[in-house]
Amino acid sequence: MAKRIFITATNTDVGKTYTTIKLLHFYAEMGLKVGVIKPLETGVQAAPIDGTLLFKTICELNPAMAVLSINDIVPLQFELPAAPYIANHAKPIDFNAIDAALEKVEALCDVLLIEGAGGLLVPLDKTHMIIDLIPYFKAKTLLVSHGDLGCINDTLQNIQTLKNAKIDFQWAINCKNYKSFEKVSKPYFDDTFSSYFIINSNFRDLAKTLL
């Protein structure tokens, strides 16, 4: 089995795909055969936007992945841009389809990145949420938080959610506006945590920690 890393975030549009792609490049530069899967994507029209970008990246970094299709990278695709529970009309999530795609991708890589959808408590069906995928995949976990105003609350809530679920994880902040973060949020993180990762500055250390 490949080394599995699950990338989740405090919400949608925080930087999961951005971070996943940075990790793929970093591990490929280390000489590892990289793979990626996004089990579910909603808001899919002609093709999954995030999944297509991930597939393009992975084929460039690991040419063996070219034998796969976009449906192997994103096995469950839904048209409505909403939580999978709603986009799939509250039907049970097809874990068999996810497992089949996972097996194909994992056979071609040393390290497998699994990108979630939305945040930890996004409902998949009546009995599962995104957070339930982490123990299902037996993956190490990276929580990505934004660096804008409100990131303290969002980060702490998600950290507590993972701790309550007894899930081991690393967390990092994706600062699109570092000057704002440095002024309104960084002082709290500096006083509260002995160390933490900022994707835009100490990314290499983060990536190595996840292996």
Image: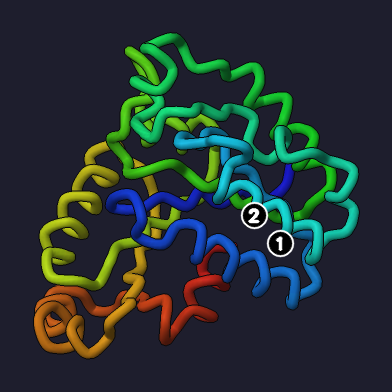
Sort mark 2 into few (<14), some (14-19) or many (20+) by Cα contacts within 10 Å. Answer: many
Q: What is the three-letter code of the residue carrying label 1?
A: Thr
The quadrant the C terminus occupies is bottom right
Horizontally, is 30 left or right of 62 in the view? left
Q: In this view, does 138 lie above or below 27?
A: above
Q: Name the residue under label 2.
A: 54
Q: Which element type, helix, strand or loop, lies under badge 2?
A: helix
| Residues under numbered marks 1 and 2 in contact, where contact means CB atoms less than 8 Å apart | yes
Q: What is the three-letter code of the residue carrying label 2?
A: Leu
Q: Which element type, helix, strand or loop, lies under badge 1?
A: helix
For the point 42% across and 82% down, the residue is 200
Q: Mark 1 points at which residue?
A: 57
In space, the residues marked 1 and 2 are separated at their CA atoms by 5 Å
The quadrant the N terminus occupies is top right
For the point 35% across and 32% down, the residue is 82
Q: Where is residue 25 in the image (x, y as percent from the top left)?
A: 67, 71
Q: Which of 83 and 112 is in front in this view?
A: 83
Horizontally, is 88 left or right of 37 in the view? left
Q: Nearer the viewer, residue 48 or 90?
A: 48
Q: Is residue 205 above or below residue 145?
A: below
Q: Position of residue 189 (x, y in %)?
A: 17, 76
Q: Is residue 7 above or below residue 40?
A: below
Sort mark 1 into few (<14), some (14-19) or many (20+) by Cα contacts within 10 Å. Answer: some
User: Which disc is residue 72 wearing?
Assistant: none
